[in-house]
Amino acid sequence: MRILLDENIAFSIQKALLELGHDVDHVKKLGIGGVPNGQVYERAQQGYHLFIINDRHFLNPDIFPPHQGLGVIFLRISMVDPNEQINALKEFLTNELEDHYIGHLTILRSDGYDIR
């Protein structure tokens, strides 16, 4: 699966997802760190299946409406310990069917998730 990580997502998450066999890009490594959110969201819609964020600005559906081919995962997990985020992502991506979250916003917490 092609995944784009927003600029404030730890690089260790990229490494963990690559090890799971995903094709993962990071906004900073693409040279678009600091670019306005709208432009980053447009980039995510171009060829990615998932956009992983922890920026609350992307939660506004009026500004960032759901896109048919793109799932957005908001990590509502402390950034202090990236391993907690990694474990939650691994569990989610391993156990949840893509059809359930592609085209939707998922709020991922350490104790579960909500798909909207």
Image: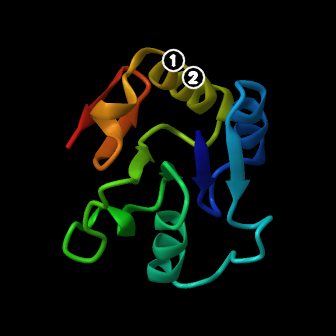
Residue at x 59%, y 21% (from the top left corner): 87
65 to 14, vertically: above or below: below
Q: Is residue 30 left or right of residue 2?
A: right
Residue 41, position as x, y percentages in the image: 46, 71
Q: Quadrant of the C terminus?
A: top left
Q: Residues within 10 Å of mark 2 (few under 14, many from 20)?
A: some
Residue at 73% x, 42% y is: 14
Residue of label 1: 94
Counting from the top left corner in percent of width and height, residue 46 is at 52, 67
Left or right: 66 in relation to 70: left
Residue 8's x, y, as percent? 63, 59
Residue at (71%, 54%) from the top-left corner? 25
Residue at figure coordinates x 69%, y 77% from the top left: 32
x and y, in percent, of residue 101 in the image: 33, 37
The label on residue 54 is none
| Label 2 to label 1: alpha-carbon separation | 6 Å
Asked whether 52 or 100 is in front, the reply is 100
- Give 44 or 105, whichever is nearer the viewer: 44
Vertical side of 43 occupied by 14: above or below: above
Classify residue 101 as left or right of residue 116: right
Q: Amino acid at mark 2?
A: Lys
Q: Amino acid at mark 1?
A: Thr
Which residue is labeled 2 in the image? 90
- Placement of 60 over or under 113, stated as above or below: below
Mark 2 and 1 residues: CB-CB less than 8 Å, in contact? yes
